[in-house]
Image: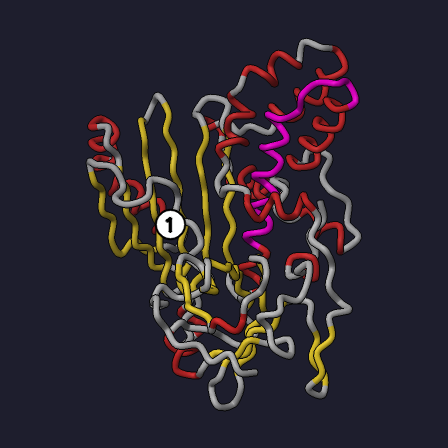
Amino acid sequence: MIITADLANAVSKVNPIFLEGTLKIAAAEAKSVGLRDGQIIQAVIENRGDHTKLLIGNKEFEMPKNLQTGEGSKFQARVSILNNGTALLTPAGVSISGGTTTSSAFVPLSPHFMNLLLHSSGFANLTNAYTNPFLSSLSTQGIFTDLISKILGLRLSINSLTSSELKNFILNFGLFNEATLAKKKKLNPFNQKLLIGQLIRLLNERGIDPQTVSRAFLDIEAAQLESNQSLQNREIFFSLIFPFKDFGTWDFSFSKIKNLENEKEDTYTFNLHTDNEKLGEVWLRVVIEKKNNLNMQMWAPKSSTYNKSLEGVEKLKELLSEAGLNVSSFEIFNDKKPGKEEPEKKKNLLSENIFSGSTIDVEA
């Protein structure tokens, strides 16, 4: 699937809640929830008896009773901040010219795209595809042998891992396929998304249920959509997994948090998570500030892994120092990572400061 900016921001119809194509949010409210000019947000409008609710993230706002929509609807909207601080929410795909709103640019969302919006984040299905006997069983069938060999051959080796191998794997994971094609460049034949897509088509042609790999394919595309949405909000976030032949898988995520006062001091965050027989479950979080200062945290419930980590701290600092990186702090905990056990996901598109009961000016 090719996801363009227009498609990613499309909605199937203009909801009647948008008077003259926009929904106005008072300046104080816009500021309190951190709305930014040009930002793309996701929201849902629902009717609940005599009440109409605007849902943004996990927050809800009471809408006037005279703005009943008839049906609930999910939509994306672009934020425009006026000179007086008031925010206008315009359904993505609507254009406003001279005070007149048109909806000719609307593109209906395909069932597949809606499926991606509802698809759970993470790579549980992709991890399962690599570890499930399903792929190995297919490799015994002649027509699948070469393709399965290529897919399983994408797995890395922990004992001979190099930085160039990591770089190539990230570039060929599938996150950047459409950007590569848009530049009229050819995809690497060992591109993970490309190979899985070929396998799905081959399974369908042979009448074999492709669900195991189809859901793995959705994992990649859902990650693409998540990355695309963060870019629309002038942020950077992406996630993937590193599958190893002899070491299970590593879940990896990367994000860049802008410093509004000084762009040179943007913060970069890396998260790694694994759960395998050798190490047990391990979480690693690295925050990079001022380009080369590292603040590191590690959680390892398994005592042997925890003790080995303590023994190797000085050696790690030495290696990183040789690479021009300074370890400002490194905390190691003999426990599970508190809170969510998954790698940190991108924060809600709106600030957590949103609170129920906020006043919204809907007079456009």
In the image, 224 versus 80, the foreground residue is 80
In the image, 166 versus 63, the foreground residue is 63
Magenta stretch holds residue 225: yes
Position of residue 275 in the picture relative to residue 159 (left or right): left
The quarter of the rendered structure image containing the C terminus is bottom right
Does residue 4 lie above or below 124 as drawn?
A: below
What span is in magenta? 205-227
Residue for point 61% across, 18% down: 135
Q: Quadrant of residue 314?
A: top left
Q: Quadrant of residue 218?
A: top right
Q: Which residue reaches farthest top?
A: 140
Position of residue 180 in the picture relative to residue 320 (left or right): right
Residue for point 64% across, 79% down: 20
Residue 264 x %, y %: 44, 71
Residue 205 x %, y %: 79, 22
Residue for point 37% across, 58% down: 288
Residue at the disc numbered 1: 322
Residue 237 x %, y %: 50, 55
10 Å neighbourhood of mark 1: few (<14), some, or many (≥20)? Answer: few
Residue 199 x %, y %: 71, 26
The quarter of the rendered structure image containing the N terminus is top right
Magenta stretch holds residue 220: yes
Does residue 115 lie above or below 232 as drawn?
A: above
Q: Amino acid at mark 1?
A: Glu
Residue 261 seen: no
Does residue 91 lie above or below 58 as drawn?
A: below
In the image, 98 versus 61, the foreground residue is 61
Residue for point 72% across, 17% down: 144
Position of residue 301 in the picture relative to residue 10 (left or right): left
